[in-house]
Image: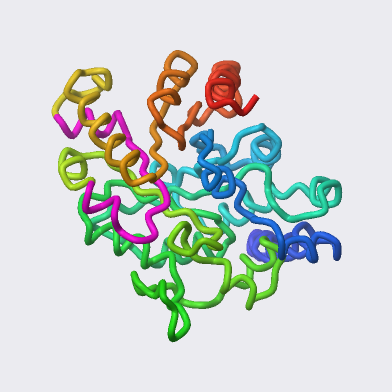
């Protein structure tokens, strides 16, 4: 009996993908003319974006985050267990069919981005491939320390470009089998191949490669990391950075703040969105400093503190 139950669970998830993600004909037609990744769309306009780290993979939480007013959700499978099936169910839970019909297009209000478990020096490409094949619109890579690791990160997200492409490098290593992703995105396989590339290297790309800076080595190498074609955003991890610098949990230590400002200055010079963790007490200051890819809460969902930080951040960014 238990085997039958497990089998039914494995079968029902793909069937749910068909039932939930099939778009209307109107949405399919308008998808050709609209970005699917709203976070990229917002960053491309030069505006600040706001998200949350999430470790609660329940369907109820997926529905809540999909209509939260956040720009993106970082699905944290670095410190939570990696499971492609759990990811698939969570992404389907974020699909708002009523919004598709109401808006007449397939763009999600909140962009799902997966933080993968491997560090830069490990680069387990199969995890990146599986996360994207489930339908993720971006990958966050922890502990990237140098240019070689950043190149590998971007390459793991890309399909090889057609011959003659002027954006063929970094050469992509992703294998082609995006059946679930095409259902989730609501587009054909050929259209997915065209659009499933990294922005801003590919101006029409719908995938965001977010590189985490969490060590003194990464800060020292920020110029060589940030100039890798295909890096879409830089995200500073203050707690890990402070720990790696020998200051424990003293994220406010002057040396840690100096390192943060070094990374931010490089991002501003190269017009690459820069992010870090914030809260209601400092989000306005961080937005004024030039951060454009920030989190406003942790794994507790949309708490009162998260809602307050989001409201203050939006106001400081001129989005309300």
Residue stretch rendered in magenta on the structure: 223-245
Give me the residue at 36% from left, 51% from top: 141
Q: Is residue 163 magenta?
A: no
Q: In this view, does 40 lie to the left or right of 294?
A: right
Query: Residue 245, position in %: x, y?
Result: 15, 31
In the image, 48 versus 17, the foreground residue is 48
Query: Residue 229, position in %: x, y?
Result: 35, 61
Image quadrant in which the C terminus is located = top right
Q: Quick one: which residue is furthest to the bottom in this view?
A: 163
Residue 250 location, quadrant: top left
Query: Residue 49, position in %: x, y?
Result: 53, 36
Q: Is residue 179 left or right of residue 286?
A: right
Q: How is the image coloured?
A: rainbow
Q: Is residue 53 left or right of residue 92?
A: left
In the image, 315 versus 52, the foreground residue is 315
Give me the residue at 49% from left, 16% from top: 280
The answer to whether residue 1 shows anywhere in this view is no
15 to 277, vertically: above or below: below
Residue 31 location, quadrant: bottom right
């Amino acid at each position: 009996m238990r085997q039958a139950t497990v089998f039914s669970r494995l079968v029902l998830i793909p069937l749910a993908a068909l039932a939930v993600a099939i778009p209307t004909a109107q949405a399919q037609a308008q998808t050709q003319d609209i970005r699917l990744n709203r976070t990229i769309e917002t960053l491309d306009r030069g505006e600040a974006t706001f998200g949350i780290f999430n470790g609660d993979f329940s369907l109820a939480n997926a529905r809540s985050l999909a209509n939260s007013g956040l720009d993106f959700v970082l699905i944290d499978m670095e410190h939570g267990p990696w499971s492609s099936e759990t990811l698939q169910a969570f992404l389907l839970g974020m699909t708002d069919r009523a919004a598709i019909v109401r808006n007449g297009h397939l763009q999600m209000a909140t962009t799902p981005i997966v933080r993968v478990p491997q560090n830069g020096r490990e680069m387990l490409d199969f995890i990146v491939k599986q996360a994207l094949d489930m339908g993720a619109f971006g990958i966050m890579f922890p502990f990237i320390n140098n240019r070689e690791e950043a190149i590998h990160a971007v390459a793991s997200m890309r399909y090889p470009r057609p011959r003659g492409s002027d954006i063929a490098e970094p050469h992509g290593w992703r294998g082609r089998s995006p059946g679930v992703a095409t259902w989730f995105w609501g587009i054909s396989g050929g259209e997915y191949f065209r659009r499933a590339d990294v922005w801003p290297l590919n101006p029409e790309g719908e995938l965001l490669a977010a590189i985490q800076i969490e060590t003194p080595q990464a800060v020292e190498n920020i110029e060589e990391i940030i100039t890798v074609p295909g890096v879409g955003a830089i995200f500073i991890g203050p707690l890990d950075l402070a720990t790696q610098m020998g200051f424990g949990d003293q994220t406010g230590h002057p040396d840690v703040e100096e390192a943060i400002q070094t990374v931010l200055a490089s991002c501003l010079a190269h017009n690459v969105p820069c992010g870090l963790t914030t809260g209601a007490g400092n989000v306005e200051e961080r937005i004024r400093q030039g951060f454009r890819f920030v989190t406003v809460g942790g794994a507790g969902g949309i708490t009162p503190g998260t809602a307050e930080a989001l409201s203050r951040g939006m106001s400081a960014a001129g989005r309300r």
